[in-house]
Image (tube, rainbow, N blue to C red):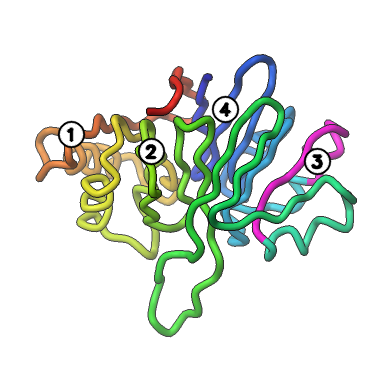
Amino acid sequence: MDLTKKGHACVRLTKDDHTLVIDPGGFTEPEAALGADVLLITHEHPDHFDESRLRAAMEANPAAEIWTLGGVAGQISAAFPGRVHTVGHGDTFSAAGFEVEVHGELHAVIHPDIPRIANIGFVVDGAVFHPGDALTVPDRPVDTLLLPVQAPWSKVSEVIDYLREVRPRRAFDVHDGLLAEPAFGIYGRMLGPDGPGVGGAEHTRLAPGSSISVSAGR
């Protein structure tokens, strides 16, 4: 399975001529969702959920389907009857040859005065975990973690502790669309061997458009 980093929180996973896309929101490339057979949306914030991009992908591929939580499904399901599926924590499903598990329930706390919304994460083929906007620790080993490295709801100490708790074999940055170029080196040092330690995980930043192979989960 090949993983391609797209802008901000979005990734594309491809295998056997099928493509799965997670969170093609408003900060990612307009074409990021095109060609997808499977679309997974973690929550309704616009940097993860862009209705116009989902509509374009669904119209371009009449066989494409969406799996997401109720808050997103309710906004787009009427346009694509039978092709938008609501899932939640503990659900599993198969789609276009991918095996997907759902983990998590709530968005991370931004501020105590801001109500929390629902958020789910996805483990794909037992190999890759995208937590959305949360520091969800799945109740299973994770080989490749897509690490939300920067957000209004996080600080670097929490990101380090999250890596220590999940203990993936390797982690690739996502949720980095608000970072300027000088920040990448700072985060790389903090999450690498010169930092305080992240439990042995191999941390790497993939530039948007870069791809890497990922193997089956452990």
Tag 2 residue: 145
Q: Position of residue 2 (x, y in %)?
A: 52, 20
SS for tag 1? Answer: loop
**Rendered position, 141 above or below 91:** above
Disc 4 crowd, CA 10 A, few/some/many (<14, 14-19, 20+): many
Q: Which numbered disc flags the more N-terminal residue, 3 or 2?
A: 3
Image marks 2 and 4: residues in contact by CB distance under 8 Å = no
Q: Position of residue 41 (x, y in %)?
A: 62, 49
Marks 3 and 1, how far apart in space? 41 Å
Q: Quadrant of residue 147?
A: top left
Marks 1 and 2, how far apart in space? 13 Å
Tag 4 residue: 13
Q: Does 64 lie within the magenta span?
A: yes
* Residue farthest bottom in this picture: 113
Q: Identity of the amino acid at label 1?
A: Gly
For the point 46% across and 49% down, the residue is: 131
**Rendered position, 96 above or below 83:** above
Q: Identity of the amino acid at label 3?
A: Ala
